[in-house]
Image (cartoon, coloured by chain):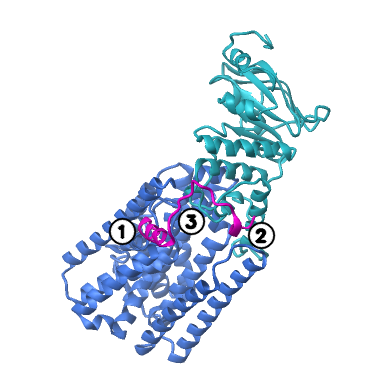
Amino acid sequence: MSTADATVDEDVEGGSPQLDLLRRFVAGDLAELRVVLALAVIWLVFYVQEPRFMSSVNLSNLVLQMTAVGLVSIGIVLVLLLGEIDLSVGAVSGLAAAIMAVLNVQHGWSPYLAIAAAVAAGTAIGLFQGSVFTRFAVPSFVVTLSGLLAWPGAQLKVLGETGTVNLNDPKILGLTSTFYSDTVGWIFAFVAIGAYAALALRARQSRVSQGLAAPQLGLVVLRIGLVSIATLVAVWVLNDDRGVPLAALILVGFCLGFFYLTTRTTFGRHIFAVGGNAEAARRAGIHVNRVRVIVFMIASSMAAIGGIMAASRLLAVNQSSGSGDFLLLAIAGPVIAGTSLFGGRGSVWHALLGALVITSISNGMDLLGLESSVKFMVTGAVLLAAVVIDAIARRQRQAAGRV
Amino acid sequence: MNDNGSTPVLSLKGVSKSFGPVKALSDVDFEVKPGEVVALVGDNGAGKSTLVKTIAGIHPADSGTISFEGQEVTIHGPTDAVKLGIATVYQDLALCDNLDVVENLFLGREETGDGPAAVVRQLDEVSMEKQTGELLENLAVTITSVRAEVGTMSGGQRQQVAIARSLLGEPKLVMLDEPTAALGVRQTAQVLELIKRLRERGYGVVVISHNLADVFEVADRIFVLRLGQKAGEFGRDASQDQVVAAITGASGNGAKQ
């Protein structure tokens, strides 16, 4: 039977399409839409309070501010998909940035080698933490909490007596200060839209040709249209200021890569399986612990990359790099955007969407000149609201007979 | 009983299994023919699950011989059993609720396109979905969509998905541990119908069940275990009282002492 003509079982929930849409909206299946609406409200509020918030200069800054935390969040999404947590990403980002800075500035390594060494250090840390977690069955919370305490110590050691290393390598600084010309920006936009449209239409076509249920053509075109508008508006705004930043391309590029890994490959499928039911995954022949260790290696590597971007933007690495609320924002972002803390549900795009929400709030409050005290409390309240919504959505799924 | 003359797909002779001082199975002879549904019944702790797990390779036998399709084999672990063509569906189903039917069916044996390394090889969703549709149609399993999350389904549908999943490896023998436990009347009927279709398609089927009504509905043969030993073997013509007597030990009928 093709899915289209499958018999409808009587014990499946009925109801009109509209009601179903409403229920899915509440139950969290359409979490992204909920977050986009919330983001629109946030932007509107800040715009009303301070029109400069929506200026192209500020929106460009917003994009630059969100890259570091967004990159770290990508790794966090993968860890959350497993149903685990990594509290060490902030500390790892600081340590990796310190390693890069010291090797490049004090030891004269080429920027590429210094960056590679920093990322490799992150990967090694992930291997270590993941191995301890799986080998000794210590909760990942505790293993990475130890990392949260230990790695800043290593960071102090690496930085040495001076405590601060100023970056001056044009390649490293260029990571966050390179902007493409208007023409190049438009080329990026059209290539991206063209590729997306081609892939979406081809995927639909291959399903149709095999007689499988396929989304309506109108729906596919609508989605292509929405993606096109979002891309074009983003490029237009960025071009109005300094142009499309390299940093944004790096963030989007990593999102695309990990989106492919998580949704189109066997390994990605196994991440979801382990997060959904580790025992079922084990019985299906999946090397559960290997999946876990690799995901922790990815998380720490992404933390290192985020730390490098943060250092590039700050023009320096110091003792407080990677500390403060960096870790919590990186975890809060995906959760706000709808990645479940309970494992098995989420998307790499939640890293980007979450970083956008979190950064918008902090950027807007900065523009309004609010005190840190208020900023922390507001951010905390937003996170709390997101986690509560996640828990409610989960309970509703369970009530609907879905665990 | 079908195919009375054919070689048993599975044949156990004098199989014993102990856990420390506890004799879970002693000297059990057991066989299943192709296209035959054998019900395994007995009280709690009678050794039903141990017998199934011995065949599935989870608790390899201490002594005795196991033959598969007439050839003597050794089963040291679950992979040996799977390779021979023995599929087991456990009571807890082992499905991932956050994955859809296609994803669950092909979990651990995903099909991909070509590519230089595993990390870039793209899952062949179209092929997997097509096979899933064909398999479910062949078994007359009814679900709303093969792309529905398993967690959204009823217990009966989940059980059918789990059974369908076990058939993907093209086994010869399918063992079901309490397939109708915790199911409603209608859903139990669905699962029993599926078991009958497995028989029609020539699989050897072993069903553990506590529910004698279910057992009498689908089983060609009823094998009673009591205290790790065979306590009786009945055809479809036996009465429920005879079977209950064998389970509780109220009669010596057929028991090997």
Question: Can see residue B157?
Answer: yes
Q: Residue B87: horizontal and vertical position, in percent?
A: 66, 38
Residue A14 lies in the magenta-colored region: yes
Q: Quadrant of residue A283?
A: top right
Q: Secondary structure at mark 3?
A: helix
According to the picture, the residue beneath numbered tag 3 turns out to be A295
- Relative to B90, say whether A130 is above or below: below
Residue A194 lies in the magenta-colored region: no
User: Residue visible at 62% across and 66% down?
Assistant: A207
Between discs 3 and 1, the one toward the N terminus:
3
Q: Amino acid at mark 3?
A: Val
Image hue for chain B: cyan
In this view, the mark in front (3 or 1):
1
According to the picture, the residue beneath numbered tag 2 turns out to be B127
Question: Can see residue B53?
Answer: no
- Residue closer to the observer: A233 or A56: A233
Q: CA distance from mark 3 to mark 1?
A: 24 Å
Q: Which residues are magenta?
A: A1-28
Q: Is residue A160 found left or right of B225 in the rendered image?
A: left
